[in-house]
Image: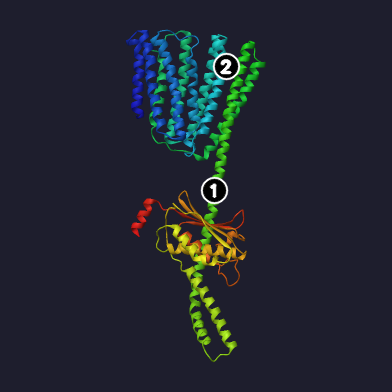
């Protein structure tokens, strides 16, 4: 619905209403037309707002839901006018219950604009904003019951009731207009049009309602009155707002979110503190009868009790959200630290691999020559016993150095290798069998938990076997140093990962943060190069997994490997490619 056709339609309806008194002088017909046309327009607005609510999410759904509630209340108030003036053909009663509905229908619309849906976080459920709207509604209900209700139903003072209702309605309308201006200033594009339309409709409705109630109070004939045209214009404006609400609206201003929350908190505090003040004034400083004073005081205190419940609930939700944000920040910080450590470790391994490959390549040929000549020299029959012992020592140290160079070359020449879907259980069992011969007569007990129903992973069997063997070997060496112990191996699925844990009750780790650093070792000289766990780290990283180590609270160390589980469809695809 474009603005020009809507304007033409509105002018046509206004012209028709203006010509009604001249063409059809029947007063009853004039009143019926004056009441039924806005009633039909308000019904269309309710339908469009409800449709927008079902098509929206989070704060936008709350916005359109509140707009629906406000327009439905307005529609019901208009229906009450039709019932008396059209169906019963009677003037409105002196104590018209519809006045309460017509007064309070502005509150949901005010709450809808006040939550500033264009600035809201999409991940926020909107529960806190809903509580802010509840606080606003309770405050206005309490204020109406305090100022207007006694004169309407208890004191039966028509003049005082009308004056109080008009003043309170003017204050309510002014607050709605100010809220629309604030939302208009902090928005742009479609949202700015929407808030501007609501503000314009509020001004027209505010003026028209006051004029119409003045006519009713004076007994003037409303049929065909041109003063109903602003009411029609207000309805058409809201109809246009509800129509453009189906468009996806952008224009959020994150930098101004603080203003929305600060205003909501300030209003909640002001509302909670204002009711005890007016209750005190009504009880001790009012000139009403004692019965009326006590009624006003009880209304104020009841509003305080309800408001306090909403305020405490809101604070509880805010505290929970704060804890969630803190927990999320902590997990993000831990994840960032792990990523930084992983990046540093990978950079170390990459640069060290190049250096080690160069040095090992240069040493391999001289060592081969030394081994061959030491073996030839040791096999000679012309050497003395001392010379033979020295030749054997040279060969022994040369072989040890050659093994070290082999480890260095193996560390530096790690390649990703071909990866296929694997069962981890056979690999872990094979690694334990390869190290099992070391457990004889060493007081080391090996315990393996059942590893049934483990999903497969995408990996290289030789590389993962090497990693498992290295971890088991380190655990066995650590337990041997203290005269024996227990090695517990377990595996389980955790969400989308497979976790393998090797835990022992040995002496634990001296520096867990340095375990995977190249050349770091706590073993005696000649028993380790400090490259085994570094190579294991590289293997797990190559498999898109994580490896960590820590000291157990009950004593001993634990190594934990996490590998991404292979989904069924992915496993079948990987098997086909292999």
Against 233, residue 395 (above or below) is below
Q: Mark 1 or 2 closer to N-term?
A: 2
Image mark for residue 147: 2
In the rendered image, the quadrant that contains the C terminus is bottom left
Q: Seen from this angle, which residue lies furthest right?
A: 284
* Residue 159 screen position, x and y as percent: 54, 10
Q: Dot 1 corresponds to which residue?
A: 331
Left or right: residue 297 versus residue 400 is: right
* Residue positioned 46% across, 7% down in the render: 219
| Residue farthest along the left direction in this orientation | 23
* Residue 501 seen in the current view: no
Quadrant position of the N terminus in the picture: top left
Q: Considering the numbered disc 1 on the image, is that residue within a helix, a strand or a loop?
A: helix
Kindly report which numbered mark, 1 or 2, lies closer to the viewer in this rendering.
1
Taking depth in this image into account, of 314 and 513 the one nearest to the observer is 513
Which of these two is toward me, 199 or 570? 570
């Amino acid at each position: 619905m474009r603005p020009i056709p809507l304007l033409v339609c509105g002018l046509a309806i206004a012209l028709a209403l203006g010509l009604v008194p001249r063409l059809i002088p029947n007063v009853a017909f004039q009143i019926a037309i004056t009441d039924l046309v806005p009633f039909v327009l308000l019904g269309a607005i309710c339908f469009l707002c409800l449709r927008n609510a079902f098509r929206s999410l989070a704060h936008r759904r709350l916005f359109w839901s509140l707009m629906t509630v406000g327009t439905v209340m307005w529609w019901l108030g208009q229906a009450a006018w039709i019932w008396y003036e059209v169906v019963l053909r009677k003037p409105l009663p002196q104590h018209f219950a519809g006045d309460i509905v017509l007064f309070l229908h502005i509150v949901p619309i005010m709450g809808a604009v006040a939550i500033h849906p264009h600035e809201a976080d999409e991940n926020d459920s909107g529960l806190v904003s809903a509580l802010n709207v509840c606080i606003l509604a309770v405050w206005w209900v309490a204020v109406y019951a305090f100022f207007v209700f006694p004169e309407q139903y208890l004191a039966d003072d028509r003049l005082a009731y009308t004056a109080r209702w008009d003043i309170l309605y003017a204050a309510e309308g002014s607050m709605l207009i100010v809220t629309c201006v604030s939302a208009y200033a902090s928005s742009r594009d479609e949202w700015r049009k929407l808030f501007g339309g609501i503000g314009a409709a509020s001004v027209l409705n505010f003026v028209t309602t006051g004029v119409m109630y003045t006519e009713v109070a004076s007994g003037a004939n409303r049929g065909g009155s041109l003063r109903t045209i602003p009411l029609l214009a207000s309805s058409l404006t809201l109809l246009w707002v509800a129509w453009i609400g189906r468009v996806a609206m952008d224009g959020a201003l994150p930098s101004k979110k603080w203003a929305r929350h600060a205003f909501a908190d300030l209003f909640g505090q002001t509302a909670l503190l204002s009711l005890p003040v007016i209750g005190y004034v009504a009880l001790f400083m009012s000139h009403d009868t004692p019965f009326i004073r006590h009624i006003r005081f009880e209304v104020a205190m009841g509003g305080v009790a309800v408001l306090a419940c909403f305020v405490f609930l809101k604070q509880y939700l805010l505290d929970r959200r704060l804890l969630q944000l803190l927990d999320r920040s902590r997990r993000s910080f831990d994840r960032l630290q792990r990523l930084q450590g992983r990046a540093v470790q990978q950079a170390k391994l990459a640069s060290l691999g190049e250096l080690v490959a160069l040095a090992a390549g240069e040493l391999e040929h001289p060592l081969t020559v030394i081994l061959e000549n030491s073996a030839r020299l040791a096999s000679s029959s012309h050497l003395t016993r001392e010379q033979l012992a020295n030749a054997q020592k040279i060969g022994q140290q040369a072989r040890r150095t050659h093994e070290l160079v082999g480890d260095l070359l193996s560390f530096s020449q790690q390649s990703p290798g071909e990866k296929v879907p694997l069962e981890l259980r056979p690999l872990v069992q094979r690694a334990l069998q390869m190290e099992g011969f070391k457990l004889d007569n060493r007081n080391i007990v090996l315990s393996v938990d059942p590893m049934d129903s483990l999903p497969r992973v995408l990996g290289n069997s030789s590389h993962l076997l090497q990693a498992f063997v290295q971890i088991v070997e380190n655990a066995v060496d650590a337990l041997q140093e203290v005269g024996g112990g227990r090695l517990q191996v377990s595996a389980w699925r955790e969400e989308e990962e497979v976790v393998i844990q090797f835990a022992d009750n040995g002496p634990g780790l001296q520096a867990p943060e340095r375990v995977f650093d190249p050349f770091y070792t706590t073993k005696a000289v000649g028993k380790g190069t400090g490259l085994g766990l570094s190579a294991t780290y590289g293997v797990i990283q190559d498999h898109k997994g994580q490896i960590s180590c820590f000291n157990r609270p009950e004593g001993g160390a634990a190594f934990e490997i996490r590998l991404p589980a292979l989904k069924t469809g992915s496993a079948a695809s990987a098997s086909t490619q292999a």
